[in-house]
Image (tube, rainbow, N blue to C red):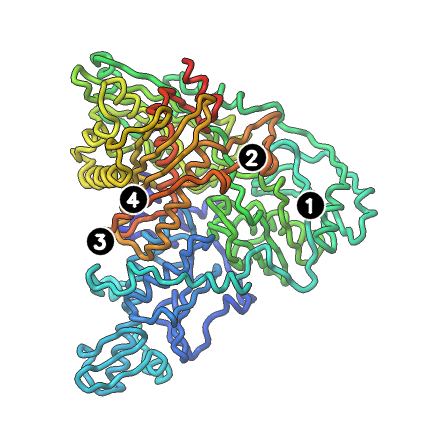
């Protein structure tokens, strides 16, 4: 676990935005803020409000507005933050409201860290701090009410936005206390740490499926997405992107035909010193439609650059070459001596596992609006990493980050795509070039071909078992582009255990599983060719989306090679010895829950049908949500796979909103199924071939299976739910296919052609 992520774990509170920014200062990635100009929806509360914390304010009418420092992309994280606050504050849910944070320095929270939304971290990172913020407000209001009523604060009861004194029957609403002006108590960091929070048996809000607060805003249109932004005097930009994903340069631009388009203003060739983009041109016009017409009319001559001849096959060939080198990569795990154990093993298994390039494709395409007001740059966009995005925007503008004001918008899907800020670069440089606010909206083709995709990966796994069929050694090489290293933020990298330098743990997380294996190596190998040709990002599930594909497939292969039931072998390996104490037991219990719910091993299935299991500790080992899946599939003679049912069990510790959790787990499971069976992007001549949903084909509604979810809430610390179920589904389906027809497929997606070929093998 790298230092940064370890410090983000919910059991620690020592990571601050300050320490994060110190770590990123060398790369220029600092989040700035300049003066006023935030729109009314993000304005500071009126002076009459009571602000127990920077994260919420109570108005004189009793309404409680919680400011969410995380990106809300449909997962309702803003409502989750409000629900955590409301629990300890004692507020009535009907009084709660939400808004999104800007990059005002007051939101540089010393506990919650960088403004980043990913890794399924939001609830686990924020639960304790937001609980303490809510409790602080309750204490301050109680003491103020006690002074007004002339009664001891210890005798007061807070519930449903009311503070009551049972003995005297006196009571005051939150509104009345705020109006009194007596709620003035402040809390130091030590004061907050000293607050005794409620125990799970005292919860009245946590664990209740209250309505999500953002839904009315999205229904009535008051929740503004980046694509909705309209500014006075605004013009529009449309992209022309090169045929090569990365590395191309513009040799010349002929705009003679574009000048005939009504409203055409200028063609701007990007000069992107942040190296986020290469070879892009923006056609600026008075309307979006005219900008698109002008873009289509531009004639651009490119130098394709060093990656113009590369393909998916090139990247895979290079990955295999790198894996074959004994000195390539760095060690992520180095326990025991697998090589020696292989020499004495009764049986040794080897297998190669691959995944293809995958695209985010959120329904709201990338967009940003940029406006310069004097020296101040205002950016309107939905993004998942304000700390980095503000720096990218500043770099594109050639200004100090302190002169950037970020206006966070609601996100029409993110899934990791909006951790990157490429959409801000053309908007900023076009606005600077034409002297007007510019709004840029990607076409679907722009969005897909210029995605910071999930990388193509190649993994080689070798396992050794003794005469009793016990797993004694496992080596695992993971070769891919390194998405997190691309960010240039040292704190997001991890020291290698062999001291060869930092590695990108976000390419190997999951390979450090909770199975007990005495001799275990994991090697992280950077595919520089893929890294340069397909600059990769974090797609929902990150590394566990491919590492568990390999690990959980190999565990199944070991079970079949040794004559053991795959589920029972996992139970055997999850013995909780040594460093696996605690985590292994929770994962084993989750696996047993999924097996029981699915009826695994109790049903005689028709010919061509099978059940497969997998269990994972996603997202990272230190921040795991223990998740297991039983997939029930039917395989046709043609090799076509139909998923009949997915049964998912997940241990989330403490569940805030049960309905919200179930929705996220269901969505994650279906996303995992989509990656497992349907999604594949390919590189040819340096460019992504798939340009729209006719050629890149995610799961359709007509293909949905039955999904059964068992959420285990045991009062432990809250964990994340947005991604873990993504990572468990593909191996469960692959294992089910083998149990159905004896076909072992080791590449994603699992196509009918691959299954049929494996059936013949």
Instruction: Give the Cα separation between the discs numbered 2 and 1.
Output: 25 Å
Image side of residue 423 versus residue 509, left or right: right
Instruction: Give the Cα separation between the discs numbered 3 and 2.
Output: 41 Å
Camera-near label (4 vs 1) is 4
Instruction: Give the Cα separation between the discs numbered 1 and 3.
Output: 52 Å
List x then y, in percent, for residue 410. Answer: 51, 57
Instruction: Report which residue position mark 1 lands on.
Output: 282
Camera-near label (3 vs 4) is 4
Question: Is residue 12 at least partly visible in the picture?
Answer: no
> Mark 2 or mark 4, which is nearer the start of the sequence?
4
Residue, x 60% and y 38% (percent of image)? Answer: 692
Instruction: Report which residue position mark 4 lands on.
Output: 650
Instruction: Report which residue position mark 3 lands on.
Output: 715
Q: Is residue 346 above or below residue 276?
A: above
Residue, x 19% and y 39% (percent of image)? Answer: 585
Label 3, secondary structure: give it. Answer: loop
> Mark 1 or mark 2, which is nearer the start of the sequence?
1
> Mark 2 or mark 3, which is nearer the start of the sequence?
2
Residue, x 68% and y 59% (percent of image)? Answer: 234
Camera-near label (2 vs 1) is 2
| Label 2 Cα crowd, 10 Å radius (few <14 / some 14-19 / many 20+) | some
| Label 3 Cα crowd, 10 Å radius (few <14 / some 14-19 / many 20+) | few
Instruction: Report which residue position mark 2 lands on.
Output: 696
Label 4, secondary structure: give it. Answer: strand
> Mark 1 or mark 4, which is nearer the start of the sequence?
1
Image side of residue 287 versus residue 127, left or right: right
Q: Mark 1 and 3 residues: CB-CB less than 8 Å, in contact?
A: no
> Mark 4 or mark 3, which is nearer the start of the sequence?
4
């Amino acid at each position: 676990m790298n230092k940064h992520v370890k410090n983000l774990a919910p059991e620690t509170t020592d990571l601050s935005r300050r320490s994060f920014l110190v770590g990123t200062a060398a790369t220029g990635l600092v989040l700035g803020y300049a003066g006023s100009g935030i729109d009314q929806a993000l304005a500071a509360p009126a002076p009459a409000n009571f602000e127990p914390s920077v994260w919420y304010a109570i108005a004189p009418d009793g309404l409680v507005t919680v400011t969410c420092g995380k990106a809300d992309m449909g997962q309702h994280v803003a409502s989750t933050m409000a629900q955590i606050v409301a629990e300890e504050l004692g507020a009535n849910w009907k009084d709660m409201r939400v808004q999104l944070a800007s990059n005002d320095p007051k939101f540089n929270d010393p506990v919650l860290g960088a403004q980043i939304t990913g890794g399924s971290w939001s609830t686990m990172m924020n639960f304790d701090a937001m609980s303490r913020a809510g409790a602080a407000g309750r204490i301050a209001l109680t003491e103020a009410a006690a002074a007004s009523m002339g009664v001891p604060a210890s005798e007061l009861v807070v519930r449903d936005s009311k503070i009551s004194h049972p003995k005297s029957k006196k009571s005051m609403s939150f509104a009345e206390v705020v109006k009194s002006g007596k709620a003035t108590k402040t809390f130091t960091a030590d004061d907050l740490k000293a607050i005794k929070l409620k125990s799970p048996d005292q919860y009245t809000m946590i664990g209740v499926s209250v309505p999500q607060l953002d839904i009315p805003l999205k229904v009535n249109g008051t929740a503004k997405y980046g694509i909705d932004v309209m500014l006075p005097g605004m013009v529009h930009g449309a992209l022309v992107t090169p045929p090569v994903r990365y590395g191309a340069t513009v040799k010349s631009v002929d705009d003679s035909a574009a000048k005939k388009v009504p409203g055409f203003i200028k063609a701007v060739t990007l000069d992107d010193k942040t190296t986020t983009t290469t070879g892009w041109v923006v056609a600026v016009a008075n309307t979006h439609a005219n900008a698109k017409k002008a873009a289509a009319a531009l004639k651009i001559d490119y130098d394709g650059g060093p990656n113009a001849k590369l393909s998916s096959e090139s990247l895979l060939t290079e990955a295999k070459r790198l894996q074959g080198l004994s000195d390539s990569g760095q060690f992520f795990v180095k326990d025991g001596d697998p090589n020696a154990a292989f020499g004495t093993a009764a049986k040794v298994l080897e297998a190669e596992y691959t995944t293809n390039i995958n695209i985010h494709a959120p329904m709201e395409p990338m967009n940003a609006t940029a406006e310069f007001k004097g020296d101040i740059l205002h950016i309107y966009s939905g993004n998942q990493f304000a700390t980095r995005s503000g720096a990218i925007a500043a770099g594109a503008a050639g200004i100090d980050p302190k002169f950037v004001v970020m206006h966070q918008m609601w996100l029409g899907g993110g899934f990791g795509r909006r951790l990157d800020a490429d959409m801000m670069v053309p908007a900023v440089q076009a606005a600077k070039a034409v002297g007007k606010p510019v709004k840029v909206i990607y076409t679907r083709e722009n969005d897909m071909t210029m995605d910071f995709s999930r990388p193509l990966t190649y993994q080689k796994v070798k396992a050794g078992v003794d005469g009793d069929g016990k797993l004694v050694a496992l080596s695992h090489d993971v070769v891919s582009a390194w998405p997190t290293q691309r960010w240039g933020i040292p704190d997001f990298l991890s020291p290698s255990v062999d001291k060869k330098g930092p590695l990108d743990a976000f390419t190997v997380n999951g390979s450090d599983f909770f199975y007990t294996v005495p001799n275990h190596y994991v090697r992280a190998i950077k595919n520089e060719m893929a890294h340069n040709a397909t600059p990769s990002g974090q797609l929902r599930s990150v590394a566990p989306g491919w590492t568990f594909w390999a690990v959980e497939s190999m565990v199944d292969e070991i079970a079949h090679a040794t004559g053991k039931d795959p589920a029972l072998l996992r139970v055997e390996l999850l013995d909780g010895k040594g460093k696996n104490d605690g985590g292994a037991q929770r994962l084993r219990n989750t696996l047993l829950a999924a097996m029981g719910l699915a009826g695994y091993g109790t049903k005689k299935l028709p010919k061509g049908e099978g059940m497969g299991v997998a269990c994972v500790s996603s997202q990272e080992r230190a921040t795991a949500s223990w998740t297991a899946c039983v997939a029930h599939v039917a395989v046709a003679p043609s090799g076509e796979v139909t998923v009949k049912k997915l049964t998912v069990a997940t241990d989330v510790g403490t569940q805030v909103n049960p309905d919200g959790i179930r929705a996220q787990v269901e969505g994650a499971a279906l996303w995992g199924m989509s990656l497992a069976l349907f999604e594949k992007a390919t590189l040819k001549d340096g460019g992504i071939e798939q340009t729209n949903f006719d050629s890149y084909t995610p799961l359709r509604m007509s293909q949905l299976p039955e999904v059964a979810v068992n959420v285990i809430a045991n009062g432990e610390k809250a964990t994340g739910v947005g991604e873990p179920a993504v990572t468990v589904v593909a191996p469960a389906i692959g294992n089910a296919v083998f149990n159905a027809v004896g076909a072992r497929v080791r590449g994603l997606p699992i196509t009918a052609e691959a299954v049929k070929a494996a059936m013949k093998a």
